[in-house]
Image: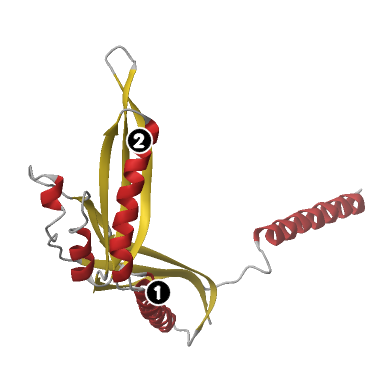
């Protein structure tokens, strides 16, 4: 009887021990890396906007859609003929914008005429030339003005700011590792994000009661602002 009790007790103890060991194995993940820390570092830079975009446009009224279309077509062709000799890559570039024809209705819903509108986009790095060209197109007035960073300027700026953000991330990771008593670290995961503050800003041009003919003979004063490019590097490192 005593032997049977001892054997039963031993079986229960072994079962309990096996259950505890099994629970411990489930609570631990052998491949889970230890001593990890998540951090981020940012860098930013302010630069002047170097790209000016101006939109000029015209509207016409006609008795039928074809007449409205032909009027706009002549105006756009004349404007392009005037602007093309001035065009220069990166300095002053010209392209067509919107071109719309739509009916004009009476109070009873009948079509009583047709209206049309056309736009040209003049843009480039040479602010003086772009502004002068946009302000001297017969029959067209400036509709909007906007500043931004050129594609080349943005690529260069983002590369510079990204390199600075990465260096700050590395420095902070090294400082944290030393603070916790480690000598170095290994990057486990990293992500890079960017954000702009400032331009481009589109500003509607106001003619202040002037006629389109008057507006076409004046250069529009413009002045660029600045834009801030901010890049953040975030990630997880394993201290070692």
Q: Is residue 198 visible?
A: no
Of residues 136 and 6, the one drawn nearer to the viewer in this rendering? 136
What x and y, as percent, mark residue 169? 40, 77
Give the mark, 2 or 1, whose residue is nearer the N terminus: 2
Seen from this angle, which residue lies furthest bottom? 183
Q: Quadrant of residue 229?
A: bottom left
What x and y, as percent, mark residue 33? 60, 71
Of residues 175 and 103, the one drawn nearer to the viewer in this rendering? 103
Which label sits in the foreground, 2 or 1? Answer: 2
Q: Identify the element where label 1 is drawn.
A: helix
Pointer 1: residues within 10 angstroms few (<14), some, or many (20+)? few
Residue 133: which numbered mark, if any? none
Report whether 114 appears left or right of 126: right
Residue 67: which numbered mark, if any? 2
Q: Are marks 2 and 1 in contact (CB under 8 Å)?
A: no
- Residue visible at 42% across and 83% down in the picture: 174
Q: Vertical placement of 53 versus 116: above or below? A: below
Q: Identify the element where label 2 is drawn.
A: helix
Q: Which residue is mark 1?
A: 155
Report whether 96 appears left or right of 208: right
Report whether 37 appears left or right of 41: right
Of residues 85 and 154, the one drawn nearer to the viewer in this rendering? 85
Q: Quadrant of residue 19?
A: bottom right
- Residue visible at 25% across and 52% down in the picture: 56
What x and y, as percent, mark residue 5? 86, 50
Marks 2 and 1 sit apart, C-alpha to C-alpha, by 46 Å
């Amino acid at each position: 009887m005593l032997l049977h009790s001892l054997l039963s007790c031993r079986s229960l103890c072994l079962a309990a021990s096996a259950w505890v060991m099994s629970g411990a194995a489930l609570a631990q993940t052998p491949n889970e890396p230890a001593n990890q820390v998540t951090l981020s570092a940012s860098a930013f830079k302010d630069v002047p906007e170097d790209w000016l975009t101006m939109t000029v446009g015209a509207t016409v009224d006609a008795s039928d859609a074809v007449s409205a279309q032909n009027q706009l077509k002549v105006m756009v062709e004349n404007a392009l003929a005037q602007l093309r000799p001035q065009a220069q890559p990166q300095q002053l570039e010209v392209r067509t914008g919107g071109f719309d024809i739509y009916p004009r209705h009476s109070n009873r819903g009948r079509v009583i005429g047709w209206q049309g509108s056309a736009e040209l986009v003049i843009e480039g790095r040479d602010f003086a030339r772009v502004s002068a060209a946009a302000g001297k197109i017969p029959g067209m007035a400036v509709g909007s003005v906007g500043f931004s960073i050129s594609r080349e300027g943005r690529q260069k700026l983002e590369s510079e700011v990204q390199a600075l953000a990465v260096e700050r991330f590395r420095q902070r990771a090294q400082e944290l590792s030393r603070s916790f008593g480690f000598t170095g670290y290994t990057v486990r995961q990293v992500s890079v994000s960017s954000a702009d503050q400032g331009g481009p800003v589109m500003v509607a041009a106001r003619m202040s009661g002037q006629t389109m003919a008057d507006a076409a003979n004046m250069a529009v004063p413009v002045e660029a602002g600045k834009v801030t490019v901010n890049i953040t590097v975030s990630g997880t490192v394993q201290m070692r």
